[in-house]
Each structure stands twice: as C-alpha cells, then as structure tokens.
Amino acid sequence: MNKPLRRIAIFCGLLVLALLIRDNWLQYVKADSLREDPDNRRVLIARYATPRGDIIVDGKAITGHAETTSGDFKYKRTYKDGAMWAPVTGFVSQAYGATQLESIEDGILTGTDDRLFFRNTLDMLTGKPKEGGNVVTTLSAAAQKAAYDGLKKQGGKGAVAAIEPSTGKILALASYPSYDPSTIAGGSDSDAEAWKKIDKKNNPDDPSLNRALREVYPPGSTFKVVTAAAALENGLYKSADEQTDSPLPWTMPGTTTQLKNEGNIPCKNATMRVALQYSCNTVFGKIGSDLENAKMLEEAKKFGFTEEQFTPVRSSASVFSDDMNKSQTALSSIGQYNTAATPLQMAMVASAVANNGTLMKPYMVDSLQAPNVDTLEKTEPEKMSEPLSPENAQILQSMMETVVQKGTGTTAQIQGVTVGGKTGTAQHGENNSKNPYAWFISYAKVGDSAPVAVAVVVQDDNAVRENISGSGLAAPIAKSVMEAVIDSKK
Amino acid sequence: MSSSTSNTSTHHTSTIGAIGAPSRRNTELALLVFAVLIPVFAYANVGLAINDQVPAGLLSYGLGLGLLAGVAHLVVRKFAPYADPLMLPLATLLNGLGLVAIWRLDQSKLLQQLHVAGGKATNQLIYTAMGIALFAVVLVFLKDHRVLQRYTYISMVGALVLLLLPLVPGLGANITYGAKIWIQVGSFTIQPGEFAKIVLAVFFAGYLMVKRDALALASRRFMGLYLPRGRDLGPIIVVWMISILILVFETDLGTSLLFFGMFIIMLYVATERTSWIVFGLLMSAAGAVGVASFEPHVQTRVQAWLDPMREYTLSRNPNGDGMVHSEQAMQALWAFGSGGTLGTGWGQGHSELIRFAANSDFILATFGEELGLAGLMAILLIYGLIVERGVRTALAARDPFGKLLAIGLSGAFALQVFVVAGGVMGLIPLTGMTMPFLAYGGSSVIANWALIGILIRISDTARRPAPAPAPSPDAEMTQVVRPS
C-alpha cells in the first residue's frame, strides 16, 4: 500500500505547489496592477487617509479638511466660500471623484507626486504622517469676491473672467449660479442628496458648470474689437479716425438681406472709433466681409480662438468658423452666426489690447509647494502670440477708451482710472427668441500699466428684454472687479 | 507492505522493529513554545498597529493559548508518548494565528456594522478550548485507533445523517445566502459536514479494508482499464450519487468535492489500481458538468471565477438577470494584490472590504494582505507540513485500517486546504468552505482538532516500540529479528 501512498503524497505536494505558484502570481507578478486598480477601494482609502494639501489664494487657504466620523475614509475636503471659488477649485469628493484644479494637481495635493518622493521616504523613515502639498493660485480674493457678488446681485446666469494683461495671471474666475463643493465632499447620504441637486438632470440651472471656462456664448458686439484689430493689422484702415467705406443701408454680399444696426445711429461711412462707440453692425460687418474669412480667422486665432486653453484647467475652444462666405463672415465679425467664445477668451482679447498687442498665456497656478512650503514648481509668464502691433494696439485702446468715455460703456467709468471697454448684446435662441446675453469686456489702466482686463457675460432670463444691455447688466460688474484689483494694488 | 522509512531515527530501522523512534516529546514542547509565542507577538502587533497600544487582553490571551497548548501537550505526553512531534505545534500555531486575525477583524467598524465581527475572537477561543477538549477525549478514550473499525457501518449511517441534517425542516439554518450546510440548535449553529468528514473517513477505511482485495482483483480488463464488478462498484456509485445530491440540495460544491476526492484517494491506496483515479476524475467531471448545467448557484461561482471583475461590476449594478452576484472574489484578489511581497503588516490592511465572509471563508485574504506573499507562503507551507506529517503517519502505520484512515484524513485536509485557498485566490471556482484552524467557526475548529487527535493517535501507534515479546512456551522456536 505504500506505493500509492507515496503517489498521494506527491499529489498533495503538487496541490500545495499549485497554491504557492498561484500565490506568487497574485502577490508578486500581478500585485502592482491589483494594488493600483482604480476599482480597488484601498486606492481611495489611502487617498483620504491623510490631510489633503490646500489651494491658496492671496496667501490664505480657500480649502481645508475635516475628519469624517463614519466610513473608511478618514478625511474629507472642506471649502471656504465654496460656491464663490468652485470654478477655480473644482471639487474633490469621496463619492464622486475630483474635477478641475483638485483633479489636475491631485498628486501634489495628496502628496503622492513623484517630486515629493524623497520627502515622503524621509517622513516614512522618521514616522511622520504623509502630508499633501499646496497649490498657490494667481487669483485675487478681492477680484473674485467682486465678480461673484456682482453676478449674484444681478441674478440670472453668468460668468466673469479677469486677467492681468502683462503676465496672463488669472485674477478672477466666477460663475453663477454655483454650488458649494463642501456639500458633496463626503460620501454620506446628504452628499448624495446635494449631488442630486446640482446635477444638470435635476437642476436646469446647472450650477456645477464652470461658465467662465467651459461654456461658449455668442460674444455679440464685443467681438468687434477683434474685427477692428483685423482691419488695422491687415491695413484695411490705418487709423481710428479714418473714414470707412460703409454704406447705410448695407446689403450683405450675395444676399438681399440688409444688415441692421440697433437703433438710429450715425454709422454711414463712420470712422472705426465712432463705429465702436455706437457699436455699428454695418461698419464692422462690412470690414469682416471685405477682409474675408481667412484673414478674420487668422486674427481670431491669434487671440486664441479655436483652441482649448490649459490654465491648467482646460477651457473650451472658442469658435470662429472656417469656410464661410462673405455674408456669413460679416455676421461672424459682429459676434453672431457661428461665433462663440468663453468668458476667458474675451478677457484674453481685452488683455491683449491692454498689453500693447501681446497676448500672454493665461494661467492660474502660480506655484506648487511641498508640505513644508518649499516651492516645487513656479509658473513663469509666457507669451502666447502677438495679435496686434504695439501701434495698432494703441489705436484700438483709444477706440475702446472712447466707448467708455462717451459711448455705450459709460457705466464702467472709474474715477481717476483710464478704462477701455466694449459692450455686447448677443442674440440668443431661434430668431432671437430668448433673452440675449449681455457682455462687457474691458481693461483698466493706471498710468502706463494695465493691471486688469475683464470679461463679463450675463444671461438673465427674468429681466425685461428692453433693459438687457452690456452696459446695464455686465459693465457694472466689470467695473467693480477692476476697482477691486486696483484697490488691492494700492 | 514494505515499510522502510520510519521517521526521525538517524539509523535505518524497520517500523516493526521493537526499538522505536525516540518519543520526541521535548521537541514538541519546544516547538509549542514558539507556536504560542508567535501568535502572542502577532496579537501585540495588531494592537499596536490599530490602537497604538499593547492590547489589554494580551496576558489573558497568551495565558489562554499557552494553557490550552500545555494541556494538549500533557495529554499527548501521557496518552500518546510516541506521537509525531510536529502536528500539535503546527495546529496550535495556525489556530493561534487564526485567533489573532479574527481579533483583528473584530476591530473593523465595517464588519461590526454587518454584525459579523466584534467579540468573535473570544468565541473562537472558547471553540478552541472545546476543540482541544475533544482532542484530549480522543487521545484519552481511543487507546487504539483500530477500535474504530468496529463502527464501520454505524459510521456510514452517522455520516449520512450528519450530512442530511441541514435539510431537515426546522433544523437547517440559513446563515448566509448560498450553501445550506448549517443546522441550528438553540443559539448554536453547527456545520455537520465538518464532523461528517471524519466519520466518513472511518467508514471508508473500514469498508475498503474489507473490500480491497475484491475491488483490486475481481475485475475485467477493458480498454486498458480494470473494471470492477458491479457489486463492488455499487457502493462507490452510491457515494458518488450522495455527494452529488448533497451538492444539489445543499448547494455545497466544496463538501461534495471533498468527500468524493477523499473516497477516490482511499480507494486508490487500498486497491493500488490507477484505473480508480481515472474513474474518479471522469465521474466527478460528469457530475460537476451535469450539476453546473442546471444549478444557477454553481454557474455564478464559475462565472465569478472566470471573470471576477464582471461579477464585481454586476454586484454593484445588477443587470436584472435574477442572479445573486458577489463582489467577494474580486475584493479578495485586490486584498492579495495590495499585500504584495511583504504585506501591509498586521492590522494595516483593508480586507474587511470583503465583508461578511472576511473572518470565515476569506480569512486567508487577510493573511495575504497583511503578511504578504512571504507570510502566506509560510502559512501554506505549514498546511503542507501538517499534510506531510499525516501522509508519513499513513506510511508508518502498521495496519491497513490505520493507513487508510490516516491517508483519508490527511488527504481530506489537503483537499480542503486546496479547495478553500485555491478558491479564495482565484485558482479554482470558489466553494465556500473554511480554512482549517484559521477561519472563524466552532464546527471547523472542533472537528479539525479531533482530526489532529486521531492522526496523533495513529502516529503514536505507528511509532510506538513493539512490546517486548511475551514470555511464551514457544519462545525458543521464535526468532525475533533485531536490526543492528
């Protein structure tokens, strides 16, 4: 009986060997892919096991963390003035993941970034708990507050983007209505409830949409600044005060349709300065038509159209169509037809003009810090393009300043400060059936330098239609943002 | 029956030799000290990792485990002095580590909310005491394992009764969904299958010892295989049918596989006919395929084995196919993977994510995660060693009944370890049995201590020096061969 016994012994040995091989396969060969599997909850547990680093504005954290009492996640994110800062921070939630800055800089904030490896190893050896690093933003708390409060006071929906023209630093990025990311930071039932409320399916106001970066609106008359730049750059007109070839009424080429102006304004053969002052559709429509699609598109692209911007949070690409005929180009050149822009894009337009023709790449992360506030990485201002020569930029500035001094943008005047701007009222809906968007783009100049350029869009479905204008709804908000920046620089 | 490999002796001896192996009781005692100290250190380690302090119960826990091991050792020393010195320490070590892991899972808030953890370690310590008591009873009252031969057919009836108890209305308890293998007596729940394993091994050993010649020799050769006669084959078919029936009615794939495998092993050893293995494999394959074709429970298990991630996703977002999906298989794989080579360390893993079976069927995942590949291989090797000592006992046993019983019990033990560990690690479909000694559960611990007791009894008989020849009138005519 011993021969089969030995064979059974070998068989049992093989069973154990099979288990050992399988164990090595699981815990050695496949260990890393199993450990890092995003569905493996340990990944999330580790992520929330240590306090997350902060997002910092003006030296103060606008985020924080709290210990959770239930569940297996130890810490959760908290936000100060969450609704105001949501377009900047995005959110990080135990249940719903992370978005925007919280997601892009997650490695730094959780402390798992490779650049923190040495420090983490040191901490592990000395027994110190792991900490996250900080993200220092370029934003200005005062500008952000002015922007958000302005939108909130206005009601309706809207967004503000403000940039420092000389560097491209984003100073304000507001969207209204907004949501408080704190309410969805956890994983409890109340977080699920809050999540449901901000979900687009349940809330037509779509508060989680970052309108400053991710929504494109027809820019309306504010786009005339781009058209004027194209006219100057292409030598169609040499100065602001040169009489243009602009018949009134003007029938768009290849059609029998007359392009209309808003009201009875002096547009016939008007100079560009006067045309911008009164916002003449006929003048700028004809400029676009005369320059034709290719030249208009080229200029729009120089301002940043058709491309997504990475601030590092991605913005949607603004639209200026390719392959349009003359009349379509004419409509696009006054910000209608297919033209659409993000508030950030229009702030970039204003900022390029204010910065004497040079467009700086917009960014909102100034630096990344290790937990001990050593700087790991600093963003240097970067030139993006030169949509205008300095001379033409000066011409355009004087035109935009005229708009604020005695044109449609007088509501944005600030005592003792040179303000240039452009209003816009963009048609919205089939046959202009919905309430239009009120736009205002502007910059402020103190002495020779321009500390701020800003774009505001307001969509107020409840306002009386006749009262909607860039000047009435959007310009006061732009004014308060500019004032806030100037005051904080004093 | 040529048996030339008696253990532990440095020089070559025959197992029938009057000079036996040294008793090795002191070796056992020394090993037991380690078997108690290692879990005590592990216990302190868990406490430090989870609560930053040495657990308050360390002293009582250490004393409790030490006392139980000491009692077991004294019983062995007194009643089975020549027993294998490794089995008791190995079982004690596994039992002790199991207690630590159960206590560690007791601390999990998640498992406490599911009412599957909290105070389980105390229960398990009581079960362990009961197990060691049964171990002692076996050694004290079973002076010679051959006595069990007398109970061959009673054992058969007993095993069948035990197996079918969970199907009795009012007695069967549905503890968790899936297999119906528990019975409830008062507030106690018992898994009779664990005890049936031992009783059935006694029946098989007794039956095969009587029938082995008929099964081995009275057969016709057919296509290179030896086919037995119908009347000899009958009982095997009956056992096969019963194991399939258990599977169908109790949805317990593991137990039926275990019994059938145990039977085939013992049959093969008894008859030395390879054809039995072939038959066994064919029949189990036919049975498994047949059952899997109409038993949704088994189908789910096979699907979960083939694609655990899909099963995980389905358990999160049911697609309305009416099946119960479980994320456990995938959670266990994540636990093993997250442990990696060296593990997270005691108390620092998250195997509670496996949820309600974390301290029973899936306790191996906790070891895998917190002790890593290194620790889990050690655990598997300890199991391998226990089996190896059991097979050695079978080799050394002097009587065919003892050989069969020892190989049956150690074969069943090996199969159980393989089926459970293989299932938890995703090597084979999951069957829902428990790791002997490690997992939480009274029946399992008590039955396995009894199993170790019987093996120790057989090994004691096997290694005991033959009694000095009785003075006999024929003494001069008898030659006693004494090897040098």
Image: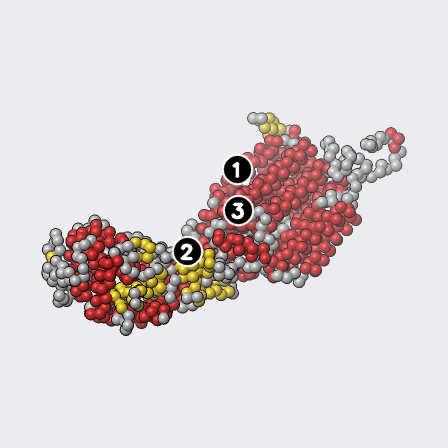
Which coloring applies here?
Answer: secondary structure
- The chain ID associated with circle 1 is B
Question: Looking at numbered disc 1 in the image, what kind of residue is underneath it?
Answer: Ala
- The chain ID associated with circle 3 is A
Q: Which structural element holds mark 1?
A: helix
Q: Position of residue B420 (x, y in %)?
A: 58, 46
Q: Position of residue B125 (x, y in %)?
A: 67, 56
Quadrant of res A158: bottom left
Q: Which mark is residue A104?
A: 2
**Residue at image coords 24%, 61%:** A394
Above or below: residue A67 compared with residue B177: below
- The chain ID associated with circle 2 is A
Is residue A152 at all visible to an observer of this figure?
A: no
Q: Position of residue A470 (x, y in %)?
A: 24, 67
Question: Looking at numbered disc 2 in the image, what kind of residue is underneath it?
Answer: Ile
Question: Looking at numbered disc 3 in the image, what kind of residue is underneath it?
Answer: Ala
Side of A422 relative to B195 (left or right): left
Please name which of the two marks, 1 or 3, marks the residue nearer to the observer.
3
Q: Looking at the image, which is closer to me, A132 or A171? A: A171
Disc 1 to disc 2, how far (Cα)? 56 Å
Please name which of the two marks, 3 or 2, marks the residue nearer to the observer.
2
Q: Quadrant of the N terminus of chain A?
A: top right
Q: Label 3: how many residues lie within 10 Å, few (<14), some (14-19) or many (20+)?
A: many
- For mark 3, what is the residue? A31
Q: Which mark is residue B286?
A: 1
- Same chain under badges 1 and 3? The reply is no
Residue most extreme to the bottom = A415
Q: Which structural element holds mark 2?
A: helix
Q: Looking at the image, which is closer to me, B56 or B255? A: B56
Q: Looking at the image, which is closer to me, A255 or A465? A: A255
Q: Label 1: how many residues lie within 10 Å, few (<14), some (14-19) or many (20+)?
A: few
**Residue at image coords 70%, 52%:** B36
